[in-house]
Amino acid sequence: MKIITSIQDMQARMLLEMQQGKKIGFVPTMGFLHEGHLSLMEKAGTENDIVVASIFVNPLQFGPNEDFETYPRDAQRDTKLAEEVGVDILFLPNVKEMYPQKQQIKLQVTDRADVLCGQSRPGHFDGVVAVLTKLFHLIQPTRVYFGLKDAQQVAVVDALIQDYNFPIELIGVPTVREADGLAKSSRNVYLSETERAQAAALFAALEKGRQLVVDGESNPVIIVEEVKEYVKQKTNGKIDYVELLAYPSLTKTTTVKQMVVLAIAVQFQHARLIDNLLFNEKGEIITTFSRGK
Ligand code: AMP
């Protein structure tokens, strides 16, 4: 595995790969890798000639009171894991390399950032699309892989690719979970023992909501209330939101029809956890999302 830290070296190497007509699978991450990240890299490996992964904790997507400084980092361990899973090129830039000067041009995510995490974390998705635009230009991937654990992010990347004509295929990959259902996340290390035990209730609550749809309920208000009630009973966390929206437009809907996302965010003492389920009008789980070139 080749480790590259400079933009110049990355551009030179990617030019070589492109000249050889290689199909390039790209997995952007913030590191502290777990099985969720590795599943994206593995999938990229089966569908492309080479896999490029990046590890960069992007300051632009953190709010002033968020955990940029304390976000968990372990480059040595990540490098070993990436190599083991078959990453060919690992891009590890530092903040100065990515942002040598103050941003002079900003992209702003509109509709798809007005809800869910976009509403609770103003500017977060603007920071996400800023870093992705740079990375997409640098790496020029054939396909990009994102986890549906962050379903809103997938919807925003979908809009970025459409609006700005990136010739890239977007692949949304199923959420990898712990045995009790908790979605794997780098931030899970911040949970106390008690919170960790309670955190499984997020997935259980979403499943309860989905089960209502399987049983014939189609009113989002009733489904959302049931999910909230369950989380309140089972955890000491503070519910940030529970919403049921059309997917990937993330627009409000008065009835469950076609694809929807049932999404939740809960603030524990030192970790804000998010999770979601995608399903159709029958309550059947949808585990993948893709958008062709
Ligand atoms: P992050 O490092 O948190 O920015 O995540 C990098 C990528 O890994 C994103 O596309 C995430 O959606 C994805 N990811 C994070 N957690 C999981 C998980 N539990 N299952 C699948 N993908 C995940």
Image (tube, rainbow, N blue to C red):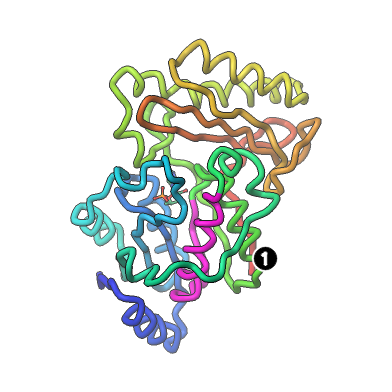
Of all residues shown, which one is farthest toward the left? 76
Q: What residue sits 52% from the left and 49% below the top? A: 124
Quarter in which the C terminus is drawn? bottom right
User: Residue 114: percent from the left, percent from the top?
Assistant: 66, 44
Q: Magenta stretch: give its range.
A: 123-146
Q: What residue sits 74% from the left and 42% below the top? A: 251
Mark 1 lies on residue: 162
- Tell me, yes or no, whether the highlighted magenta stretch contains residue 127: yes
Determine whether the residue tagged by mark 1 lies in a helix, strand or loop. Answer: helix
User: Is most of the magenta stretch helix, strand or loop?
Assistant: helix
Of all residues shown, which one is farthest toward the right? 254
Q: How many marks?
A: 1
User: Residue 12: percent from the left, percent from the top?
Assistant: 36, 85
Mark 1 lies within 8 Å of ligand 1 (Cβ measured): no
- Tell me, yes or no, whether the highlighted magenta stretch contains residue 189: no
- Of the pair 201 and 156, the residue shown nearer to us: 156
Of all residues shown, which one is farthest toward the bottom? 19
Quadrant in the rendering for residue 162: bottom right
User: Residue 219: percent from the left, percent from the top?
Assistant: 77, 24
| On screen, residue 135 above or below 264 | below
Q: What residue sits 56% from the left and 35% below the top? A: 276
Quarter in which the N terminus is drawn? bottom left
User: Residue 51: percent from the left, percent from the top?
Assistant: 38, 67
Neighbours of disc 1 within 10 Å: few (<14), some (14-19), many (20+): some
Q: What residue sits 50% from the left and 56% below the top? A: 128
Q: The residue under label 1 is which amino acid type?
A: Gln
| On screen, residue 70 above or below 97 | above
